[in-house]
Image: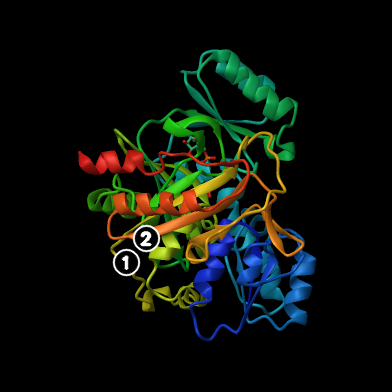
Amino acid sequence: MKLMVIGGGGREHAIIKKLRENPDVERIYALPGNGGIAADAECVPIGATDIDAIVQFALEHAIDYAVVAPDDPLVLGAVDRLEQAGIPAFGPHKAAAVIEGSKVFSKNLMKKYGIPTAQYEVFDTAADALRYLETAPLPTVIKADGLALGKGVMIAHTRDDAYGAVRAIMEDKQFGSSGDRIVIEEFLTGPEVSVLSFTDGTTVVPMVSSMDHKRALDGDRGLNTGGMGTVAPNPFYTPSVAQRCMDEIFLPTIRAMNAEGRPFKGCLYFGLMLTPDGPKVIEYNCRFGDPETQVVLPLLQTDLLTICRAVTDGTLADVDVRFRPDAAACVILASEGYPLKYEKGFEIAVPDDCEPQVYFAGVEQRDGRLVTSGGRVLGVTAVESDLKSAVASAYAMADRIRFQNKFCRRDIGARALSAQEK
Ligand code: AMP
Ligand code: GLY
């Protein structure tokens, strides 16, 4: 079989490495992939949002199955377009991807169907939002409606910060038309849990839970990033919490999307906060998380391609999806200065024995050598029988991988480990 994976980061590398385990897979094309993914797939310089070119490539190369990984092509309707051209694809249709593409849509969905989430108001003018903020409780959370590269959420602790956030999003258009409308919501507290799930629109199969570390610096300080590391499973996600999430959040969401005439097929990501009042939805994503995928897929025992195809065919109930009862930790190695200004173009040296556990993101090839080309350069994942050993092994590998200006957080997994000890 010939496969095509859309996207070019660490998440896509993890998906590709897992798909390759299926002996029927002869070839995988990555569009666009990256210089590190090139060791595991044929990289094609077609951008992830160039849907016309993606469909044309798929037809010319007789692709049997496509996996669309990033949010933007899904929201633009890449799966619909591929299917119209006769190419089965993993991921939600455009009508369902709106669950991530519009925060106003997802908040209204949760309200209509009684799915627990933060209280909120929607605004389509800055004047109305600013007036509301004069008396709103603080801290408050301001979210651009549309996609904003994961940066469209601002937590304001003072009224001036809140006014500034509204002006940046709605008047200065920091995120373009994604900020035409905003959601202002209640500030929630509690541990965060990411739960990725496979769903074919009827059956929902949660994957092993995980915990992201979004801030740039140790102790959850510094700016928000695309994610500096992950662990799985998440010790805060106990079996009783999991049951509650299934009953109050996962199944109601699947049913709500069906009732809206927007059945969701693909990977539905539940970003949850375990508040003192129970689990609540912070966000939905219409895709695999990055870097959650880099800890979740290495624990997956069942063949990924079999699961994906069952999701597309609507036969997920027939697949026995299993995860190893082990723990995984992923440490992201970034360029010093990320997420602001950083230098790039430095050669990367990865010891051969680490290579299978490395997921490349911001890298490119120059004269046959791998060099840094982005903020998040790569992730390295260790799987061990317990979380403490997984964290230790991931750091041991991270320390042996070399490039100039290498930077990582030193406390990935620390909060999870202290929760386990309680
Ligand atoms: P998002 O881009 O929606 O994942 O939000 C980024 C981060 O902002 C989340 O991971 C949370 O840590 C935080 N956040 C979002 N919404 C809220 C909220 N209502 N209360 C507290 N923190 C929030
Ligand atoms: N790790 C968060 C995300 O993928 O959106």
User: For mark 2, what is the residue?
Assistant: 383
Is the residue marked 2 within 8 Å of ligand 2, measured from its CB? no
Q: Earlier in the sequence, mark 2 or mark 1?
A: 1
Compare residues 106 and 301 and report the one nearer the observer.
Answer: 301
Q: Say which mark, if any, is on residue 324.
A: 1
Residue nearest the observer in this picture, 131 or 33: 33
Task: Locate residue 412, reporting x and y percent.
Answer: 41, 43
**Quadrant containing the C terminus in the rendered view:** top left
Question: Label 2 to label 1, Cα distance in Å?
Answer: 10 Å
Q: Is residue 195 above or below residue 282?
A: below
- The secondary element bearing badge 1 is classed as loop
Q: Quadrant of the N terminus?
A: bottom right
Q: Quadrant of residue 162?
A: top right
Q: Nearer the viewer, residue 418 or 346?
A: 346
Extreme residue toward the left, this view: 422
Taking the image as shown, residue 213 lies to the left or right of residue 129, namely left
Asked whether residue 255 is in view, the answer is no
What colouring does the structure picture have? rainbow
The residue positioned 79% from the left and 68% from the top of the image is 53
* Residue 242 shown left or right of residue 220 in the figure: left
Circles 2, 1 touching at the beta carbon (< 8 Å): yes
Q: Is residue 163 visible?
A: yes
